[in-house]
Image (spheres, rainbow, N blue to C red):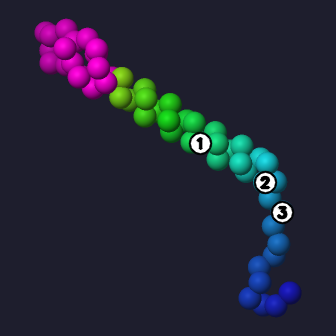
């Protein structure tokens, strides 16, 4: 091993892919959950019939 090479690190690629897919799924769930919430003015009722559109 030359002085420019670091030590070899063993990574379980199956577990790494599983973690990556899990993170992507959590991001998608977060985006969908955030898009389904809208703040309405005090004293008004709002119903979300379309994404981010208060009717």
Q: Does residue 22 sit above or below 44 in this rendering?
A: below
Q: In the rendering, which numbered label is found on residue 39?
A: none
Residue lying furthest right: 1
Q: In the rendering, which numbered label is found on residue 10?
A: 3
Viewer-nearest of discs 3 and 2: 2
**Can you give x and y, in whole percent of width and height, for residue 21 in the image?**
64, 42
Q: Residue at x 51, y 39 (%)?
A: 27
Element assignment for label 1? helix
Quarter where residue 23 is shown: top right
Q: In the rendering, which numbered label is found on residue 13?
A: 2
Q: Is 11 left or right of 50, judged from the image as shown?
A: right
The residue labelled by disc 1 is: 23
Q: Considering the image in quadrants, where does the C terminus appear?
A: top left
Please give the range of residues in magenta: 37-55
Binning the other alpha carbons within 10 Å of mark 2 as few (below 14), some (14 to 19) or many (20 upward) gives few
Q: Main secondary structure of the magenta part?
A: loop
Quarter where residue 4 is shown: bottom right
Q: How many marks?
A: 3
Whether the magenta-drawn stretch holds residue 42 is answered as yes
Q: CA distance from mark 3 to mark 2?
A: 9 Å
Element assignment for label 2? helix
Q: CA distance from mark 1 to mark 2?
A: 15 Å
């Amino acid at each position: 091993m030359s002085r420019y090479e670091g030590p070899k690190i063993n990574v379980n690629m199956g577990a790494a892919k599983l973690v990556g897919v899990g993170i992507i799924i959590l991001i998608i769930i977060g985006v969908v959950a955030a898009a389904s919430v809208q703040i309405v003015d005090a004293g008004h009722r709002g119903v979300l019939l379309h994404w981010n559109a208060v009717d």
